[in-house]
Image (spheres, rainbow, N blue to C red):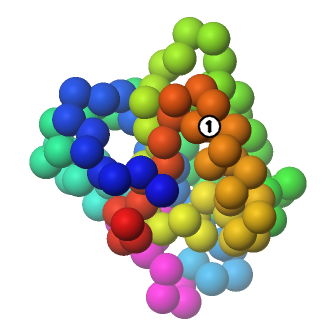
Amino acid sequence: MGNGNLSGKRVFIYARVSPSRQNGGSLSLRDQVAAAEAWVENSGAQVVRVFSEKASGTVDRCDGIHEMIASAESDDHPVDAILVETPSRLCRDAQEFRRYRNRLGQKNVEIVSLTHD
């Protein structure tokens, strides 16, 4: 997980809610995005794009994740980091999360969580 020092860096924000859990304690999409945008503003980073979706935490059902990862890994290197509320917003499976973190790390893109170090 990234250290959160994003001053001057370009970021994607990713927010997700599970359709069955949206009202069960998770922040809404709007709240996740607002918290991330406030964090970015305070850190001196720049939001390149916001990806948000209402989908299960199962990665194969999350089209927004696939689009975001492909964009982050592209040769034009549009971002330095992906900002999420918690790692579970990106995906619930720990092995899948590590795979994404390693893939993105090879492209010098870090995953930063608002709530985890």
At 54% from the left edge and 89% from the top edge, which residue is drawn? 24
Percent across and percent down for residue 75 are 63, 11
Foreground pick, 93 / 21 = 93
- Please tell me whether residue 18 is drawn above or below residue 90 in the rendered image: below
Q: Quick check: 41 left or right of 67?
A: left
Percent across and percent down for residue 59 are 79, 57
The amino acid type of the residue labelled 1 equals Leu
Residue 91 in the magenta stretch? The answer is no
Percent across and percent down for residue 14 are 51, 49
Quarter containing the C terminus: bottom left
Q: Is residue 65 visible?
A: no
Outermost residue toward the top in this view: 76
- Indicate the quadrant where residue 63 lies: top right
Residue identified by numbered label 1: 104
Q: Is residue 10 visible?
A: yes
Outermost residue toward the right in this view: 60
Secondary structure, mark 1, is: helix
Magenta span covers which residues?
23-31
